[in-house]
C-alpha cells in the first residue's frame, strides 16, 4: 500500500475534482455561475492560507518578488477569473460531464501554445496525442441527443461548448503564465495562494463596481447553493489541490497527472445518478479515448 501511496492520492484527487464540479453545477443552477465564482474564490483563499501556514510556516508568501506577483496576477485573471467563469457557465448550459470533458483540452491547448509562443518542440507522439484528444472530444460533443440544457435550446448548447473550450483555454494560458511566475523552483502552494488572492481581489473589485454586493448576499440566502459552494470549495481548491501537490511529490509527474485527469470518467456514473443524465456507449468510449490522448501528452 505504501509503495502506491502517490497513485492512491492522485486517484483521490480526481474524485475530489469530480465532486467539486458536481457541487458547483448544483450551485450554479441555483444562483448563477458568476455568483459561484465570486464566492468560492475568497473561500478558497482562506482555506489555502490555512494550508500554507501549516505547510510553509506563514499565512502569505509576502517574501515573493514583485515579478512573481505580476506573472501570477495575469495567470489568475486568465485561469481563475475568466477561465473558471466560463467553465461554471458551461456547467449550467451543457452539464458537468461534457464541461469537464472539454476541460481535458487544457493540456492540449497548453502544448500548442507552448509550441507557438515558447518554441517548445512537438514530438510525433505529442502530435498524435493532440489529434486523438481533439477527435474523440469532437465525436462525443457532436453526438445526437446532446441537445443542450434543460430548456432544449440548441443555441445554448453551442454557447456552452464554446464556454467549455474557453475555460480550457483560460486554464492553459494561466498555467503557462504561472510557469513564468514560479521560475526558480518557487513553491507551488505559495504560487497557488498568490493566484487565488489576486483573483479574489480582481473579481470583487469588478463586482463592487457593478453593484453586485447586494445580489451576492441575497443569493447566499439559498441554503442549497451555499452548502454546495462551501462543499465544492473544500473538495477542490482546499483538499483536491493539496492532495495534487502530495501526489506529484510521491510519484512520477506523468503518472500523477494521468490519474488526476480521470475526473470525466468518474463523473459518468455520478451525473447519471445525480442528474439522471443518459450516458451512451459513444460518450463512454469517447471520454476514455480522449483521456488516453491526454495521457500520451503527459507520458512523452
Image: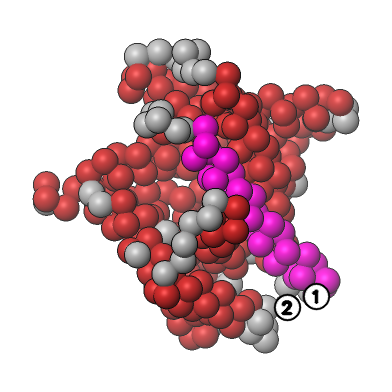
**Residue for point 39% across, 17% down:** 53
Q: CA distance from mark 2 to mark 1?
A: 6 Å
Name which quarter of the figure residue 223 lies in.
Answer: top right
**Residue for point 47% across, 13% down:** 63
**Residue for point 11% across, 50% down:** 3
Pointers 2 and 1 in contact (C-beta within 8 Å): yes
Q: Is residue 155 magenta?
A: yes
Work out whether residue 124 can be spotted.
yes
Q: Position of residue 75 (x, y in %)?
A: 61, 38
Q: Is residue 23 left or right of residue 285?
A: right
Q: Residues within 10 Å of mark 1 (few under 14, many from 20)?
A: few
Work out whether residue 223 can be spotted.
no
Task: Report the magenta residues as a range.
Answer: 153-181
Mark linked to residue 154? 1
Sequence-earlier tag: 2 or 1:
2
Q: Main secondary structure of the magenta part?
A: helix
Is residue 213 or residue 54 the one in the foreground? 54
Q: Tell me the residue that label 2 is attached to.
A: 147
180 shown above or below 32: above
Q: Residues within 10 Å of mark 2 (few under 14, many from 20)?
A: some
Is residue 277 or residue 189 the one in the foreground? 189
Name which quarter of the figure residue 144 lies in.
Answer: bottom right
Q: Position of residue 260 (x, y in %)?
A: 38, 55
206 shown above or below 255: above
Amino acid at each position: 500500500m505504501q509503495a502506491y501511496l502517490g497513485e492512491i492520492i492522485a486517484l483521490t484527487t480526481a474524485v475530489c475534482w469530480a465532486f467539486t464540479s458536481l457541487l458547483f453545477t448544483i450551485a450554479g443552477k441555483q444562483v448563477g455561475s458568476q455568483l459561484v465564482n465570486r464566492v468560492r474564490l475568497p473561500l478558497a483563499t482562506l482555506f489555502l492560507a490555512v494550508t500554507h501556514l501549516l505547510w510553509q510556516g506563514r499565512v502569505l508568501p509576502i517574501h515573493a518578488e514583485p515579478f512573481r506577483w505580476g506573472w501570477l496576477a495575469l495567470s489568475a485573471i486568465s485561469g481563475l477569473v475568466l477561465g473558471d467563469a466560463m467553465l461554471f457557465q458551461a456547467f449550467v448550459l451543457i452539464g458537468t460531464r461534457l464541461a469537464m470533458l472539454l476541460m481535458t483540452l487544457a493540456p492540449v491547448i497548453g502544448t500548442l501554445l507552448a509550441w507557438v509562443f515558447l518554441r517548445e518542440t512537438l514530438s510525433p507522439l505529442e502530435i498524435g496525442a493532440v489529434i486523438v484528444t481533439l477527435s474523440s472530444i469532437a465525436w462525443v460533443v457532436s453526438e445526437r441527443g446532446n441537445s443542450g440544457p434543460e430548456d432544449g435550446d440548441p443555441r445554448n448548447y453551442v454557447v456552452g461548448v464554446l464556454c467549455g473550450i474557453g475555460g480550457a483555454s483560460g486554464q492553459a494560458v494561466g498555467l503557462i503564465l504561472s510557469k513564468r511566475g514560479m521560475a526558480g523552483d518557487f513553491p507551488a502552494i505559495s504560487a497557488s495562494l498568490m493566484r487565488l488572492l489576486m483573483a479574489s481581489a480582481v473579481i470583487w473589485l469588478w463586482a463592487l463596481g457593478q453593484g453586485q454586493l447586494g445580489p451576492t448576499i441575497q443569493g447566499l440566502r439559498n441554503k442549497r447553493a451555499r452548502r454546495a459552494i462551501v462543499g465544492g470549495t473544500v473538495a477542490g481548491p482546499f483538499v483536491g489541490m493539496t492532495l495534487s501537490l502530495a501526489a506529484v511529490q510521491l510519484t512520477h509527474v506523468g503518472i500523477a497527472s494521468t490519474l488526476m485527469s480521470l475526473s470525466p470518467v468518474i463523473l459518468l456514473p455520478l451525473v447519471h445518478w445525480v442528474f439522471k443524465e443518459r450516458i451512451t456507449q459513444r460518450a463512454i468510449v469517447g471520454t476514455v479515448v480522449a483521456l488516453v490522448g491526454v495521457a500520451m501528452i503527459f507520458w512523452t
